[in-house]
Image: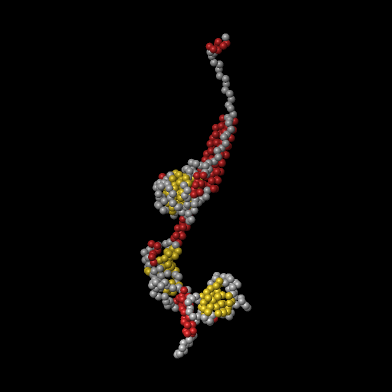
């Protein structure tokens, strides 16, 4: 017969009930078939034994059927298990041909078929092996190290791209030092920034730390970037400081409101003193003073409420040095003047430069929602990692929401240092407290006494004629 099919392995998923499985490739003896049960979760494999877990029918140069034994033990493959049936023809030659005379064609053809099947088995095994591509220039695929040499080592590639099993994951040598011989996969610590490096090329060190600026930097690979982690921590601390500053500014605004209330109370007291000339009028003035004091208390309460409501939050933005009042771009901020003290308008994107670019436009737009139209609030800006570079601006008018970016009218309050295009900034906002309610008008004082009647004037000619 001919052997045109290349199939020599078939797999079936278990379902807890199927017990009969087709063997779709031809085989000759039951020993030519190998059966494996594997667990899909753990990957564990069990090679089954004919007559224990299963029996075969068919074969003898044809396909067949595998039937699972269910008694006295039920070996039916369960859900989550896979049964694999593969050709397992032995690589021996058991056909003996006579030295002379006619040759049995059936025996010769069967031997040819088995040789082809052996080739198919080898091809199937090769498909599961790690191989170099056909165009690969690899010159060696041999592993010559002994078991002792391979123990606790990695299978890797050397600098020529050939297999080696003498490499360890890496050996920690300690702190980097100059004039030291380092080998491949030595691990060191850069004490200038706590970064961890692994050596990729053997060499004798020279120069100084940090390794990132050393002439041999290409001979090291960075494993742990501790310096970047420290910078991130510093940025977080700076953000917290900016938030605290924002809270302080809010408290200062509240104090200013309370001071204004005290001034109103003082004025009321002065009015009461002036009113002592008239007891009734003094009482009315005192009533007016009490109303003014109530207004001052209301203003103080409003300021305290504003202080409690302010959220000390700082947002990350990137400085764009263009002075054009237009959309600065995602996570960017612009000033309308290169001189920090001369800035009168700020253009800020609706989204910050924080991870995920959160939209904070509603928070920015709310700064002018208060009733204190002459001073809506403050904007505080600090350069990341350089607290001495800062700006504080008073918001003096309505904020314009341009859908995607906002324009804020401001006046300069204080600043220090200077900014460069691309600087990372942390920005916080503080809204002024609402104006306190106006006190009620005091009652009108009593009408003063009627003045004395004036003296009789001289009679006129008309008076004389009238009297006859």
Residue 312 coordinates in the image, percent (x, y): 51, 50
Q: In this orientation, which residue lies closer to the viewer: 63 or 83?
A: 63
Q: Quadrant of residue 181?
A: bottom left
Number of labelled discs?
0
Residue 90 coordinates in the image, percent (x, y): 50, 81
Q: Quadrant of residue 279?
A: top right
Depicted 116 relative to depicted 400: above or below:
below
Depicted 148 relative to depicted 272: above or below:
below
Residue appearing at x 44%, y 76% in the figure: 149
* Residue found at the very far right of the displayed protein: 72
Q: Is residue 16 left or right of residue 238?
A: right
Way the structure is coloured: secondary structure
* Residue found at the very far bottom of the displayed protein: 100
Residue appearing at x 54%, y 12% in the figure: 462
Residue 415 visible in the picture: no
Residue 109 coordinates in the image, percent (x, y): 47, 83
The C terminus lies in quadrant: top right
Residue appearing at x 45%, y 90% in the figure: 100
Residue 98 visible in the picture: yes
Depicted 114 relative to depicted 172: above or below:
below
Residue appearing at x 48%, y 56% in the figure: 355
Q: In this orientation, which residue lies closer to the viewer: 333 or 241?
A: 333
* Residue found at the very far top of the displayed protein: 468
Q: In this orientation, which residue lies closer to the viewer: 196 or 286?
A: 196
Residue 210 coordinates in the image, percent (x, y): 40, 62
Q: Is residue 309 left or right of residue 326?
A: right
């Amino acid at each position: 017969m001919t052997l045109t099919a290349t199939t020599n392995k078939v797999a079936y998923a278990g379902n807890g009930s199927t017990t009969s499985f087709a063997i779709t490739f031809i085989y000759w003896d039951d020993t030519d078939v190998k059966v494996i049960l594997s667990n899909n979760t753990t990957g564990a494999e069990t090679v089954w034994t004919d007559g224990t877990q299963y029996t075969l029918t068919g074969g003898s140069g044809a396909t067949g059927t595998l039937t699972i034994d269910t008694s006295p033990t039920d070996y039916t493959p369960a859900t989550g298990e896979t049964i694999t049936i593969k050709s397992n023809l032995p690589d021996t030659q058991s056909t003996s041909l006579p030295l002379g005379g006619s040759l049995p064609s059936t025996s010769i053809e069967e031997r040819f078929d088995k040789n082809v099947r052996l080739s198919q088995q080898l091809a199937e095994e090769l498909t599961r092996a790690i191989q170099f591509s056909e165009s690969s220039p690899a010159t060696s695929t041999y592993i010559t190290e002994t078991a002792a040499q391979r123990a606790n080592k990695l299978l890797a590639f050397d600098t020529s791209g050939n297999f080696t099993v003498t490499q360890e994951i890496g050996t920690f040598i300690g702190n980097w030092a100059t004039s030291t011989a380092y080998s491949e996969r030595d691990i060191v610590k850069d004490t200038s920034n706590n970064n961890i490096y692994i050596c990729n090329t053997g060499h004798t060190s020279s120069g100084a730390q940090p390794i990132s600026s050393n002439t041999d930097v290409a001979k090291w690979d960075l494993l742990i970037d501790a310096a970047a982690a420290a910078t991130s921590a510093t940025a977080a601390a700076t953000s917290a400081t900016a938030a605290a500053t924002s809270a302080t500014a809010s408290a200062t605004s509240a104090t200013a409101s309370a001071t204004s209330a005290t001034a109103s109370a003082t004025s009321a007291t002065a009015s009461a003193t002036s009113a002592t000339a008239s007891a009734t009028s003094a009482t009315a003035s005192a009533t007016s003073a009490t109303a003014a004091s109530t207004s001052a208390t209301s203003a103080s309460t409003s300021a305290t409420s504003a202080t409690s409501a302010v959220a000390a939050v700082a947002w990350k933005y990137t400085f764009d040095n263009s002075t054009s009042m237009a959309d600065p771009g995602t996570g960017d901020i612009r000033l309308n003047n290169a001189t920090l003290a001369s800035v009168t308008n700020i253009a800020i994107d609706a989204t910050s430069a924080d991870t995920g670019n959160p939209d904070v436009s509603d928070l920015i737009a709310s700064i002018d929602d208060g009733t204190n139209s002459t001073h809506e609030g403050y904007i505080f800006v600090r350069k990341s990692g350089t607290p001495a570079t800062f700006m504080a601006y008073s918001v003096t008018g309505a904020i314009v929401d341009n859908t995607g970016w906002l324009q804020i009218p401001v006046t300069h309050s204080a600043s220090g240092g200077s900014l460069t295009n691309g600087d990372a900034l942390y920005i916080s906002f503080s809204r002024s407290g609402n104006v306190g309610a106006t006190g009620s008008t005091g009652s009108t004082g009593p009408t003063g006494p009627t003045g004395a009647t004036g003296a009789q004037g001289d009679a006129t000619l008309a008076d004389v004629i009238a009297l006859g």
